[in-house]
Image (cartoon, rainbow, N blue to C red):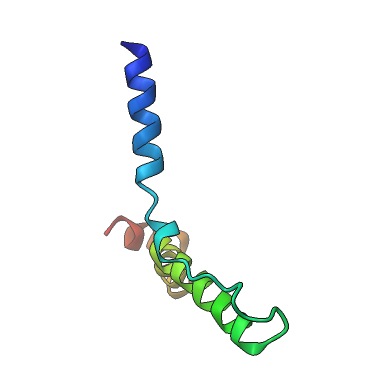
Amino acid sequence: MIRKFIITSIILLFSNSPILADVVDCNKFSKLSKDYLKCQKDNLKQKSDDSGLTGTVKNFKSSKTLSEFFKKNKK
């Protein structure tokens, strides 16, 4: 019983990784080229947008007090 639960948990853990799905392979570019840097920047931006971190940072910057930030974050 516990063994089935552990196996099911592991399968669900590895199947629910949406961040890794949209990563573009940048190895096709030379590492010193501007195309490689642009590719890396786009991958980083995609990951941060998917994680929801950018919205939280914008809320933090626009709030004047800490209590105002927590009120915005609850919504």
Where is residue 52? Give x, y as percent: 40, 62
> Does residue 60 appear to the left or right of 73 in the view shown?
right
Point out the image quarter for the C terminus: bottom left
Tell me the quarter of the picture where residue 5 sits: top left
**Residue at the outermost front position:** 28
> Does residue 69 appear to the left or right of 26 in the view shown?
left
Count of marks, rendered view: 0
Q: Is residue 60 visible?
A: no
Tell me the quarter of the picture where residue 58 sits: bottom left
Q: Is residue 42 visible?
A: yes
**Residue at the outermost bottom position:** 34
Where is residue 28? Give x, y as percent: 59, 76
Which of the pair 30/37 is nearer the observer?
30
> Does residue 42 appear to the left or right of 18 in the view shown?
right
Where is residue 14? Give x, y as percent: 41, 41
Q: Residue at coordinates 36% horizontally, 34% vertically from top-left?
A: 11
Where is residue 56? Give x, y as percent: 42, 64
Q: Residue at coordinates 34% horizontally, 37% vertically from top-left?
A: 12
Would you place residue 51 above or below residue 44 in this image? above
**Residue at the outermost right position:** 32
